[in-house]
Image: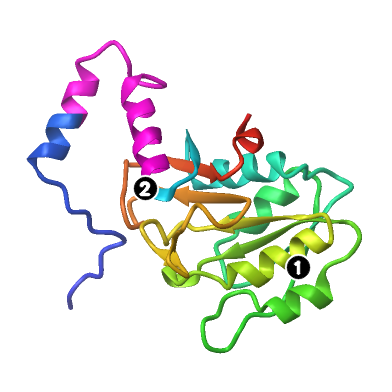
């Protein structure tokens, strides 16, 4: 019986050389390689970018930037890894699940609209299996209720929504670079935002 691997990476000599160069430098964290990575991600997405420890940390940072605390509700999808909801709950938020669309399994804008309340401070969507959620109507719904749209794009880096790069459409977009994601840094995550003030 063949074994199905948890993840399979494509690593070539240039990847190994890049890691070796960092290991031989004086910077194992927060150094020039991180800044270069953030700049490359910003250029690719067309938004401002910060790197963090992992995808869950990216979600938590995005929720903090959105003002999520114990007085807030977050509307999200049940079709996701636990971190999408758990990161909001660690800040004390109440998480409310809304239904998904039959065709994409992404958060259904109509379901989000009937679920949102005056306590909602974020609508958190997941690009399920890398397929972008319907971001424009979801952002419009969120903004109409003084909430922000947070996009969990853990599997959608390099994708686009209506000819706009993923990372530039939602108020805050999170990425994961875990080994089972589209690209990996071993671990790691990032947050992007068109408005740099949200990342301050």
> Which residue occupies the extreme front position in the image?
163
| C-alpha separation, residue under disc 1 versus residue under disc 2 | 27 Å
Q: Nearer the viewer, residue 135 or 68?
A: 135
Q: Which residue is mark 1?
A: 141
Q: Nearer the viewer, residue 26 or 198?
A: 198
> Which residue occupies the extreme top position in the image?
26
Q: Residue at x 69, y 39 (%)?
A: 65
Query: Disc 1, disc 2: CB below 8 Å?
Result: no
- Does dot 1 land on a helix, a strand or a loop? helix
Q: Which residues are magenta?
A: 19-43
Q: Going from the N terminus, do you reach mark 1 or mark 2 first?
A: 2
Q: Which residue is mark 2?
A: 44
Q: Residues within 10 Å of mark 2 (few under 14, many from 20)?
A: some
User: As drawn, is 27 to the left or to the right of 95?
Assistant: left
Q: Quadrant of the C terminus?
A: top right
- Does dot 2 land on a helix, a strand or a loop? helix
The percent coordinates of residue 171 (x first, y second) are: 63, 51
Q: Residue at x 53, y 50 (%)?
A: 174
Does the magenta segment cover residue 85? no
């Amino acid at each position: 019986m063949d074994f199905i691997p948890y993840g399979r990476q494509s690593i070539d000599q240039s990847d190994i050389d890049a890691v070796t160069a960092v290991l031989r430098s004086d910077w194992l964290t927060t150094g020039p390689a991180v800044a270069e990575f953030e700049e490359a991600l910003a250029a690719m997405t067309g938004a401002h970018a910060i790197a963090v420890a992992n995808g869950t940390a990216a979600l938590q940072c995005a929720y903090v930037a959105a003002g999520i605390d114990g007085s807030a509700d977050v509307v999200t999808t049940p079709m996701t890894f636990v971190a999408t909801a758990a990161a909001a709950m660690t800040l004390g938020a109440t998480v409310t699940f809304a239904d998904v669309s039959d065709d994409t399994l992404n958060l259904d804008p109509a379901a989000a609209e009937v679920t949102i309340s005056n306590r909602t401070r974020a609508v958190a969507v997941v690009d399920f299996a890398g397929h972008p959620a319907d971001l424009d109507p979801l952002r419009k719904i969120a903004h109409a209720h003084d909430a922000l749209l947070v996009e969990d794009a853990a599997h959608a880096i390099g994708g686009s929504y209506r000819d706009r790069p993923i990372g530039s459409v939602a108020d805050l977009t999170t990425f994961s670079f875990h080994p089972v994601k589209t690209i990996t840094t071993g671990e790691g995550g990032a947050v992007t935002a068109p408005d740099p003030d949200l990342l301050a």
